[in-house]
Every structure is written in structure tokens, then in C-alpha cells.
Image (cartoon, rainbow, N blue to C red):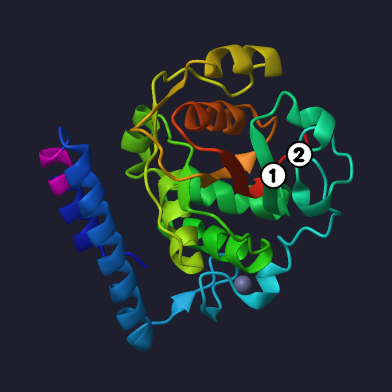
Amino acid sequence: MFPPCFRILKKIITNFSSSSNLLTCSIDNILLTTSNMSDQLLSLFAPHYCINCSKSGEHICGTCRLDFVQTNPSVCYRCNKLSEGNQTCVPCRSSSPIFSVDWAADYGSAAKTLVARGKFGSSRGAIRAMAMIMHQELPLRGGIDLVTYVPTATKRVRQRGFDHAKLLAKQFARLRGIPCRRLLHRRTQAKQMGASRLTRRRQLKTAFRPASVVHAPTVLLIDDVVSTGASLEACARTLKKAGAKRIHAAVFARNRG
Ligand SMILES: [Zn+2]
Ligand SMILES: [Zn+2]
């Protein structure tokens, strides 16, 4: 639950401060904290409802969570070969900047519905449910200095009212107790849906720029869905050029399509 007054307040302040990323970032943190506090307070009087079956209690109930859980073995996200801890295998590592990719669910019908509700239905509850599933299912990785995310195209953020990947990353980072910061900006707004792997790679080569120098050695990069991994790789390359040494990625669902 996210009280409408916070959404309106955030919109006013964000519009007012659009020229100041720093101020917007601080406001985001304040509003996220305030929203989480108000969530906890409100849940005393009005409990959360499962986003999938409406049962009261949590953003996603234990029964529905089982629909999402992936039981597949640990593999390299690039070539599907068995690989301990979802690490990128040695041959793939020569051309991938990502050390490992963890995912909580397969991109089946249940996961598709939840992602669509979050992304296209602008449901913050769905995004929080995704973050909770990721928190409960993904392995604990030590040594992560900072969490960040694949920034959404500005046009999409305006349409949806929020950046779903940013909210997912912030919620997940809060649950794990790791700081979360914006480290990337999207330079191009090129449409990627339906494009071939080669075309996507070409489009993504210059799609991101660093927000600043990255002082954190190990960064966890968050996105909702991984398909070819091209977006994650483009972000990871940019982060490494900006100073990061090792990039892990974590997503809600993996699309093997
Ligand atoms: Zn449920
Ligand atoms: Zn591989």
C-alpha cells in the first residue's frame, strides 16, 4: 500500500526539483522510508493483501509464492551450462562483464502476470511482491557494496508514474540491508522490444552513461526480467568503466524464450 498523498507529494517535489538529481535522490530516500513506515503502521489496522489471490497478510502469500519459485539447477545465464552459484562460466566470462546472474522465477504465466501488473498496471504492490520473492528465494551474497538498477526510459517512467526497476531495487536493497543508489542514466530511448539480439546489442552499446564515478568495488545490478542479458551487460560494462570491479546481477524472472 502506498498512500495517494505520498504519490502526489512526490510528483510535485520531483517536478519542482527536476534539475537537481541529488535533491530528487534524497527525496526518493525520504519518501521510500516514509512509505515503508506508513506501510508498517497501516498494516496494523489494514493488512496487506496478496497481489495474486487477495488473501490478507503479505504482498504475496506463501501459497502463491510457490507458483513463482524456480527449481532449476544453477547455470550460466549465457550458455545454460551448469555453473555453481549461477556464475558466468569461464568461456562466457571472456565476453561478459557480469560475474553471476541470480533469478527467483522462470518467466512463466504467473511471473508474466505479476511483472505486467507492476510495469504496465503501475502497481507498486506487485513490485514489492517481486522484491519480497527475490529476497526469499535468492542466495545471500556477501561482499556487495552497493545495489543499483537498470534505469527505465524516461518516457516509460512518465507513463507509469514511477521507475519500476528503481522501486524493485530499493525494496530489495532495504530487505537485504544494503545501500541502493542510482549509478546509471539511460542515454538513448531506443525501442528494444522485438529486436534481434544483434540489433539490441548495437542499440545498447551507447545506451547508458554513469551517473558518477563508482567507488564501490562490488555492485549488485537489479532488473525485473533477463532475456538475452544484453541490457544487464551494457549496464555492467558502463559500471566497470566508471570504477566498479565486479558486477553481480539479480532479477525477478528469467525468460528463456
Ligand atoms: Zn496469494
Ligand atoms: Zn556460459
Looking at the picture, which amino acid does disc 2 mark?
Thr
Classify residue 246 by image quadrant: top right
Q: Is residue 22 visible?
A: yes
Which region of the structure is painted magenta?
13-17
Q: Badges 2 and 1: C-beta atoms under 8 Å apart?
A: yes
- Residue 28 falls left or right of residue 163: left
Residue that numbered label 2 is attached to: 88
Classify residue 47 by image quadrant: bottom left
Residue that numbered label 1 is attached to: 100
Looking at the picture, which amino acid does disc 1 mark?
Ser
Label 2: which secondary element: loop
Which quadrant of the figure contains the N terminus? Answer: bottom left
Q: Residue at image x 47%, y 20%?
A: 207
**Location of residue 242 with respect to 246 vertically, above or below:** above
Mark 2 beta carbon near ligand 2 (under 8 Å): yes
Q: Upstream in the sequence, badge 2 or badge 1?
A: 2
Q: Position of residue 50 (x, y in %)?
A: 54, 71
